[in-house]
Image (spheres, rainbow, N blue to C red):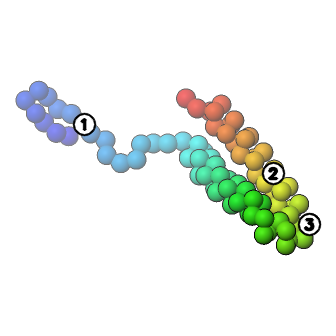
């Protein structure tokens, strides 16, 4: 608490209280974004798509679709829970 001629004031220092669930979801979204970016770069690499077996390329494409779907669902959930 600090005192001045005009009165007293409280200053909260530190991290504000956050909903742990929302905090975890934001971390999860960042991780999904990193994985999506990595897969997009991999699939945009012509050397990878030309040399890798077709089954591997298809598996990575399917994984990208799954991650993008999960990312969309998570973003919608975060929007619904926003204050």
Give the number of the mark in front: 1 or 2.
2
Image check: 61 left or right of 79? right
- Please determine whether, in this image, residue 26 is positioned above or below residue 51: above
Q: Is residue 77 visible?
A: yes
Identify the residue at horizontal 14%, vertical 28% (top origin): 7
Q: Which residue position holds label 1?
A: 10
Q: Residue furthest right?
A: 55
Q: Which residue position holds label 2?
A: 66
Identify the residue at horizontal 90%, vertical 71% (top origin): 53
Identify the residue at horizontal 69%, vertical 35% (top origin): 76
- Please determine whether, in this image, residue 30 is positioned above or below residue 49: above
Give how far across and how far down residue 56 sits, in percent: 87, 67
Nearer to me, 52 or 77: 52
Give how far across and how far down residue 61 sits, in percent: 83, 57
Which badge, 2 or 3, comes first in the chain's sequence?
3
Q: Which residue position holds label 3?
A: 54
**Crowdedness of circle 2 by 10 Å Cα count: few (<14), some, many (20+)?**
few
Please identify the quarter of the rendering in which residue 40 is found: bottom right
Give how far across and how far down residue 22 sits, in percent: 59, 43
**Crowdedness of circle 1 by 10 Å Cα count: few (<14), some, many (20+)?**
few
Image check: 34 left or right of 10? right
């Amino acid at each position: 608490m600090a005192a001045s001629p005009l009165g007293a004031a409280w200053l909260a220092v530190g991290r504000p209280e956050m909903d742990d669930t929302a905090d975890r979801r934001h971390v999860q979204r960042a991780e999904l974004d990193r994985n999506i970016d990595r897969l997009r770069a991999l699939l945009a690499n012509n050397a990878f798509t030309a040399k890798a077996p077709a089954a591997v390329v298809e598996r990575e494409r399917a994984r990208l679709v799954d991650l993008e779907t999960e990312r969309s669902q998570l973003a919608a959930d975060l929007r619904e829970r926003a204050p």
